[in-house]
Amino acid sequence: MSVQQVAPIICSACNAQFTAPVHNIINGQDMAMKSAFLQGQMNAVQCPQCGTVASAAIPILYYDLEKELALVFAPPELGLAGSAQDKVIGKLTNSVVDSLPAEQRKFYLFNPKPFLSFESMIKAILEADGITEEVMEAQAARVKLLEEFFEISDEAALKEKVKAHDAELDYEFFGMITAYMQVAQSGGDPAQAQTFLALRTILAQLSTNGKEHTAKIDAELGIVTIQNQEDLLEKIQNAKDDRELESLIATGHALLDYTFFEKLTAKIDQATKNGDAKTAGTLRALRSDILDIKARFEEQSRAALEKASKLLQEILQSDRPDKALEQKLDEIDEAFFYLLQMNIEEARRQKQEEPARALEMIGNMAMSMLQARHAPEPQAEQPEAEPQILTSK
């Protein structure tokens, strides 16, 4: 398991206190999580007060059943020592052990190897993977190159950069971007995920082998990415069955506007003009199916958002939002968090910081309650949360 929890954070830049979702147990067999963890992106959080983005200093337990590996790191800035540190590590260890079937509960899991620095822990993980110092340097170079691409705002300069580094834009480079994209998506940050996807798409188009690399990566991971309306239409036409068709329409829903159907109608007209009645008929049936599925999704979405809006208003109007959340926990879903995020963004756009913070608090409480419900141990048994420190990377 890769466990996420909501932790209290103190920003090292402005001393603001806030809460943020972080991972303190990393399953080394979860490749997306592992990749983000090794590259220092797993617990990067942003201070809502000053905007500083840095790593949250939290105790971390890393384990890999295949390699029989259990490692633990407690950042020295937390001031944990002696019995306090043993208690924290014990809780993390018990969480992992209790989540496993009896036959997988091996001795090494009960006695994780401690590390004095995050870097030494990462090095041990890479060494267990057979990764040499040269490979580590190459990965660091990829991260640096990615950061440099993000800093470019001029299209001509970006093209020149891609041309100069074309050989370095290999399978591993695009795999790294994809891992960042997946972690952002799973961490509830679709905007950041979209940013990584947009850069990946541009670099794939400009580089020599980028499209080939991203297609292979997406096929291996089962990822469906849609570049534009033409790409969506092509994928819909080649859908193997109704399930894949519905999945594509759900994924590319934002692209199904008037222009999309105009392009589809143009294809129908062209087929009719060419005397290809079979293709024209197939495309007409496809257009009808798309419209029906789109309408069904929109109706479901409307109903879900109306339900979420009613629930959010009920919680906001309650004297005890925490109690209201507890009572309505079964009704909290993706639509609720989507609506909550939209309200937070609108409040911030209108410079209404207090309402934005109140909404964020509700989101954090809801996430914490949901995670506690599915945690291997009851939340009440966890040690009292201590403020964690936001440290520069």
Image (cartoon, rainbow, N blue to C red):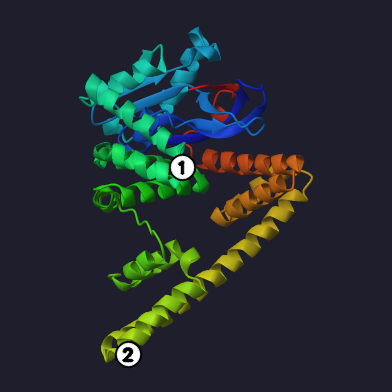
Residue 320, x across and y down, in percent: 75, 43
Q: Is residue 64 left or right of residue 92?
A: left
**Cα separation between marks 1 and 2:** 45 Å
Three-letter residue code for mark 2: Thr
| Viewer-proximal residue among 388 and 86 | 388
**Residue neighbourhood size for the residue with mark 2, other residues' Cα within 10 Å, grouped as few (<14), some (14–19), many (≥20):** some
Please say whether residue 290 is visible from this viewpoint: no
Rendered residue at 33%/67% (across/down): 235
| Viewer-proximal residue among 64 and 206 | 206
Residue 184 is labelled as: 1
Secondary structure of residue under mark 1: helix
User: Which of the two discs, 1 and 2, sits closer to the camera?
Assistant: 2
Quarter of the picture holding the N terminus = top left
Residue 34, x across and y down, in percent: 35, 33
Please say whether residue 348 is visible from this viewpoint: yes
- Quick check: 353 above or below 285? above
- Quick check: 293 above or below 319? below
Rendered residue at 32%/28% (across/down): 141
Residue 272 is labelled as: 2
Q: Mark 1 and mark 2 in contact? Answer it, CB < 8 Å.
A: no
| Viewer-proximal residue among 352 and 104 | 352
Q: Quadrant of residue 237?
A: bottom left
Residue 300, x across and y down, in percent: 54, 69
Rendered residue at 68%/56% (across/down): 311
